[in-house]
Amino acid sequence: MFRNGLIILSQPVSVLRPQVPRLLDHIASVISETAYILVQPAVRTSAAWHPTALLSPLPCTTEMQSFVTDVYMQSSSHCQNLDIRILLNHITNKAGLTRPAYTLRQHLDVLISDTNWFAERWAADSASLLPILKECFCERSVSGASLVVRSWDEGQQFDEDELDQKSKSARLTLTSYDHVVCGGTFDRFHNGHRLLLTQCCLICDKELLVGITDKDMNNKKLLNELIQPIAERIAVIKDFVTDIKPGISLDTVPILDVYGPTTIRPNLDCLVVSKETARGATIVNTARKEKGFRPMEIVEIGLVEDSCRAPEEEEKVSSSSQRRRLLGQLLHPLTPKPHLASKPYRIGVTGGIASGKSNVCFELEKLGAKIINCDRLGHKAYEKGTQAYTAVLQEFGSHLVTEKGEIDRAQLGQIVFSDKSKLEKLNSIVWPEILRLVEEEIQQFATECVPVVVLEAAVLLEAGWDHSVHEVWTTFVPRDEAISRICERNKLSQEEAARRVDAQLTNKQRIAKANVVICPLWEYEYTRKQILKAWDLLQQRLPDSSAPVNSSL
Ligand SMILES: CC(=O)SCCNC(=O)CCNC(=O)[C@H](O)C(C)(C)COP(=O)(O)OP(=O)(O)OC[C@H]1O[C@@H](n2cnc3c(N)ncnc32)[C@H](O)[C@@H]1OP(=O)(O)O
């Protein structure tokens, strides 16, 4: 298996199209990460090896457009996880246009061609072929020592002349435009995004403008808390477009409403939309007309199906399905914590008020973890006779003492939850003591050879205890859902509930520091499913995973 490869296809596109599923299967069996596809019939007819053979201009036709669609539509069922990039820089209808060579982002490990000619030439004289490949695909992408050259089978036999006649009607020239625009969330970049951007690049001669949803545009989306930061989404788009068509300029802008830049930039010629957003295209063109801008041509592309979807997911490949799949998975890589003993392995479970932490811990306990409830230890921390007891009374007054001589937590809670500085004072007294009690319990579990200990701590991140656990897992539900749960559970008004939620870290702040996220927004069984997944995946990364604790109860 090779990580990245270039597939040079020399057969006419009409011959290639029916072979796409076979081709994708072959690519998936050889390449694991990025597969560049270069369609170049000139290499079959070219007598001499020359860069012009690889990069000579190819007409931009409706047939090529269909080939691009076929590749992405079928990649979902043939090579779902491969990053396929169809190179388009040499495909143009502009006579005399010289475009720069490719500067591929990935280093090529394998070159596969559908003509044996390549492999034979490489075997005979790689020294003279190598500089040509470097010239076409950039120095750093191709290094001679490690590049493997292989042939895919020669494909079907075809009669060039006969084919030419037959497919003339299918080879209609595709209209291209100087200024093309498209928009989207571009979260968790997938084949739907690749198809959209590839179709944009195919018909774009000068500038591609990509609008990327931001802020309010994202807030209503499912699991929006997991949407990647806009800078990350832009970086992925740049990487992709620069790879497939370095000859055009790319501009990216955040969009805060459906119009984005379309009602600001008069020079836009063509808007590319998916079936899903086609309605928005009419709205945008109406708004342009009102501003005196000429309407844009609208190009509509199909939706890529998601062949691996779960019953609760959408039929098309979608970012929200991808985000659902992140639940229970390792979202952020682990930070090494050499200061912690490797056993027992410590998971800190945190989460906002009413976000379902306790249920997660309840399920984890059934799976074999031992739970340390930090609220309980918090109460123990200032029991009568302890140092913290004296410190709390000194700070908050002896009127808090009940008839039994204990601290009245209900009263203390009223004081600290309505005054941030007082809560901070209480925290500074009790957190060190709670942590000491936590360590005591962990030591006890260590003597009992417990493999996994879970610290259930509401304010784990605020207390900086992420340094005291190997992993942080957080639960979250959307803000509105948390408010309605609190209203029902604690019999509070909407305003009071909102105040409680807003006094805490936001979901995004917690998620940014969490290794695993669980979202108990749907039926309990789905939450349980996420927890089982998280537990099973955890077993694979436990320091001693030779004796896994299986989730099948
Ligand atoms: C780092 C940690 O997470 S340690 C665990 C949390 N405990 C602490 O921080 C110690 C300080 N807190 C306390 O002493 C007590 O919670 C008091 C006095 C404020 C209130 O006591 P009680 O009325 O018995 O309420 P209880 O301890 O059950 O806490 C009520 C809620 O406030 C949360 N809470 C507790 N302490 C804090 C805090 N310092 N900051 C924010 N929320 C807190 C609890 O997790 C609980 O949340 P839930 O309703 O979603 O389960």
Image: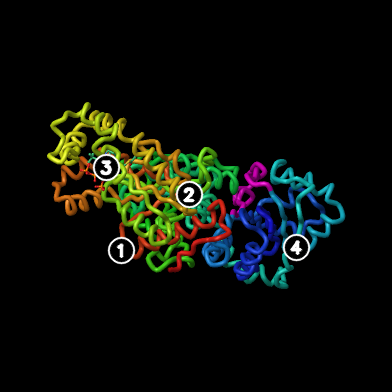
Q: Is residue 159 above or below residue 450?
A: below
For label 2, the crowd category at 10 Å Cα-Cα, with few meaning under 14, some 14 to 19 and many 20 or more, is: some
Residue tagged 2? 446
What's the amino acid at mark 1?
Glu
Q: CA distance from mark 2 to mark 3?
A: 24 Å
Q: CA distance from mark 1 to mark 2?
A: 35 Å
What's the amino acid at mark 3?
His
Q: Is residue 63 above or below residue 122?
A: below
Residue tagged 1? 523
Residue tagged 4? 151
Q: Nearer the viewer, mark 1 or mark 4?
A: 1
Question: In the drawing, does residue 380 fall left or right of residue 196?
Answer: left
Q: CA distance from mark 2 to mark 4?
A: 57 Å
Q: Pointer 1 and pointer 2: residues touching (CB < 8 Å)? A: no
What's the amino acid at mark 2?
Ala
Is residue 377 on the magenta stretch?
no
Pick whichever of labels 1 and 4 is earlier in the sequence: 4
Q: CA distance from mark 1 to mark 4?
A: 51 Å
For label 4, the crowd category at 10 Å Cα-Cα, with few meaning under 14, some 14 to 19 and many 20 or more, is: some
Pick whichever of labels 1 and 3 is earlier in the sequence: 3
Percent of width and height locating residue 445:
44, 50
Q: Which mark is residue 379?
A: 3
Q: Nearer the viewer, mark 1 or mark 2?
A: 2
Percent of width and height locating residue 63:
57, 63
Q: CA distance from mark 4 to mark 3?
A: 70 Å
